[in-house]
Structure formats: C-alpha cells, structure tokens
Amino acid sequence: MAKDDEKYRWDWATQLFPTIDPHSKIKHQIIDEYIQTYIDVLMRNQQMPALGLSVVDGFSGGGIYHNGSGGQHFGSPVIALEAIQQSEIRNNLERIKPRAIRSQHYFVDVKPENTACLHAVLASRGHAVRIGQDVHLHTAEFTQALPTIAHNLKAFGMGERVLFLLDQYGYSDVPFSKIKWIFQNIANAEVLLTFNVDFLVAYLSERQANRKAIANIDLERHVPWDMLKHLKAHNPRNWQYLIQRCLSQGIKKETGAPFMTIFFIRPVGPSPMAYWFIHLAKSYRANDVMKKIHWKYGNNFSHMLSPSCFFGYDANRDITVTDQQELMFEEEHQFDIVTDSRIRNELSEILPKQVYEIERQLFGHLMGGLANYTMADESRVKQALDVAVTNGDLLALDKDGRKKRRKGSSIKITDTLVAPPQRPFFFLTPSPKTDNSK
C-alpha cells in the first residue's frame, strides 16, 4: 500500500522495503479476515456452483515489508490473493464436488519501481503464472486506471462482486465522487478506504488553498466554515470531534453508500495522527460482517461520532506493542465488557420504544435502519432486545406469524417485532428515530 516518498520505498534488487507499523498490521488483519469471512458467508449457499470475486487495490505499493524483527510481512495484494486461495480450500473440505472461486485482481500503483517490486514478490510467492491472466498490474494513478478496470470488471461478470482496497496516504487521492461512481456503475461493489482525518482536521482553515483541497474531495459543503473560528475559540477540546461528525455524515452522503462503518486507527506515539478505516457497502450483511471483525480488533472507543459507540484500534493501548502489561492489562481486559454493556443498555431502552411507535416492524428493517447509527452488530442488537422479548414487553414472531420467540437471541432476520396491546408505561415516551426508509 503506497505511501510517502521518504518512508515507503521498494526495491526488490536491493531488498529495500519499508518497515510495517503495528497499526498497519491490524489493518491488514482486518482485510484478510474480512475477505475470508465474506467468502464463507456467500458460500453458505450450498447450491452456488462457483463464486466470482474481484479485488482492486488502488494503492498497492511493493507488496512486502520488513516486520521489525528480522522477518517479512506481505502487503495487501498478497493478503488478498492468498486469503481467497485459503477460503477456496476451506470451503471445499469434505465436498465431493468442489466449488471454485473465480477471482480477478487489479493492483495499481503510480510508481514503476513499486509495480516492479510487486511483480517480483508475486512471483516469489508462486503467482507468476497468473500475472496477465487474472492478476493485472497497472502503473498509473488509481483514478486514471479506474474506467478501464471497471470495464474489465463488468466484462468478467460473476455478479460484479468487487472489493476496492483504497489505502491512500492522506485524504486527497480519492475524491468521494469517484467512490459514488463506483457504486453507481458496479453492481456489488464495496470499498475499504483509508482517510487521514486527523491530518485534514488539524490543518483545517478558511484559507482558499485549504478550502480548495476539501472541495477537491467533494466535502467542502459539509464543513461549517462560518462556525469554524467560533468552534476553535469556544470549544478547544471538542471542536475537532464536531468537525469529524460533519465529515462522517458528508462522506456517507457524497458516496451514496447505503451502509458505512468507521473504524479509527491511532498509531503508536505521544501525539499520533489517527485515521479512519472506512467500509462502504450496499449490503447490510456486509456491514454486519465488518462490524463483527471490528469488535475483534477494537481496543478503544469514543461516543463522539455515534450515539451508541464509535471505536477502533489505538496502538498505544496494545500491550503487544507497548509491552506495558502491568499498566494496560486491566484496560485491555475490560474493553469488550464495558463497551458491550454500554451499547446493550442504550439500545435496550431505545429499540423497544421505537417498535412501539411503529406497532409492527420486520427485524431486518430495524437492522437496516439502525446499521449506520451504532457499532452494535446483529448479535448485540438481539441481546439488547432480550429483556423486552423475555418479559413479553415486545413480541418477536416468525415469518409466518405463528411461532413466538422466547428470547432476543433467538430472533431471525425475517421475524416481525410487534408491540403487544398492553404497553409498559416506561416504553410510552418518544424515542430517537433511526432511518428505516430502506
């Protein structure tokens, strides 16, 4: 994944590679696990004869890093290729008739030396025969290569399932209008985007050059420019969070993605610049899969961007990075417990009230409307409904309306939530609205 000229340089002949940072390893782990889980979910359909999946890495870099301890760490192009290979093997275990995963890979980098290094890395991993067949290397700016790649993706067919990995260094290489174009032109596209939000916000000002930079990525109208000086003067501790909230809403609107999840990643250091790892998708199920993975790798949370929870990975709180086991163990151990409890408590109050206002609601519609407003995945939402369902304060009926669930964790996506005629008084006050216009 290509970055700045100083740190991120590749040369296969001299074995010159950048050293991978701990926060980047977490990002790679998320990519690896998401691809494999994505495939597992799709291949649960036992009638599917074959699966098609394409990966476009728009900032692929040289494909290899030093890991800081004398070994090597492979980049996202190798991770994607081999995650698909491993998934195909795993999903065909004990099957009499194997099912193939047909994949196409497009690796793009603006620097010829990076592309050359990636070519050598792929060959060293046994992928040389695929280059020019289903693995394609492009030396170009991603936005320039996109139209040709999109044409080839549509010609490939196979449901146009495409995962775009856009690990830009800053925030300005991928205008959000381009991501909107991807969603408009590729049927089942998803995007994983790195967005250096702290860098953008730290240097935010009303200067023309600054406003132009924001305009170039289609977010200018989402920044409250007329309030900027006032916010900085009167909210010195929170003004950046307020701007981030505006930016997050703007990103979702400008991309046109129905579902968005933001996972912040903070590098190690005394005052590191955090960035967002954004997942954009058309599918609620894809959004839910990504949230489950974020819960696995998260070790910090904030309520600034979401009424329920917004969380991510902070390398300064990772004991495998800091080696401060005595200081960090209790905080690390408590993260999931505290965050789980907080989200479930909030949702257990909000959701039954919402259903009471609507009278009847499909659980799938509830999840679709809720997805962009909480980091709770489907299993946690079910847990939040457990008390109401168990006590009969809320009814959960199967798709035929015959079977009544006994607890929240038993709810299926096709179930209907129903408010019983007798309503507990504590559910009668108005509740916050979520977007159910799906």
Image: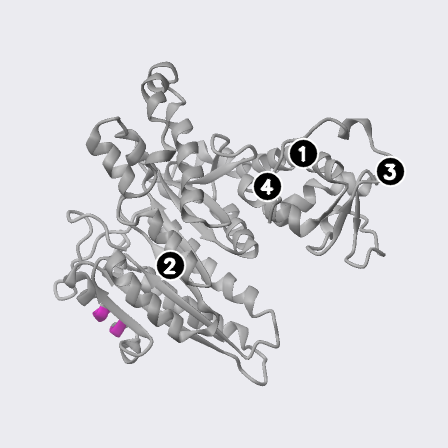
Which badge, 4 or 3, comes first in the chain's sequence?
Answer: 3
Q: Is residue 144 left or right of residue 254?
A: left
Which residue in the structure is indicated by mark 3? 421
Which badge, 3 or 1, comes first in the chain's sequence?
Answer: 1
Whether tag 3 and tag 1 are in contact, CB under 8 A, the answer is no
Whether tag 1 and tag 2 are in contact, CB under 8 A, the answer is no
Which badge, 1 or 2, comes first in the chain's sequence?
Answer: 2
Which residue in the structure is indicated by mark 2? 164
Which badge, 3 or 2, comes first in the chain's sequence?
Answer: 2
Q: Which SS type dominates the magenta stretch? A: helix
Question: How far is disc 3 from disc 1 in space, using C-alphas?
Answer: 19 Å
In the picture, which quadrant includes the N terminus? bottom left
Question: How far is disc 4 from disc 1 in space, using C-alphas?
Answer: 14 Å
Which amino acid type is marked by label 2? Phe
Whether tag 4 and tag 3 are in contact, CB under 8 A, the answer is no
Residue at the spot x=56%, y=70% of the render?
43
Residue that protrudes farthest toward the bottom in the picture:
96
Dot 4: element: loop
Residue 308, image quadrant: top right
Residue at the spot x=64%, y=32% of the render?
346
Specify the segment rendered in magenta: 119-123
Question: How far is disc 4 from disc 3 in space, using C-alphas?
Answer: 25 Å
Dot in front, 4 or 1: 4
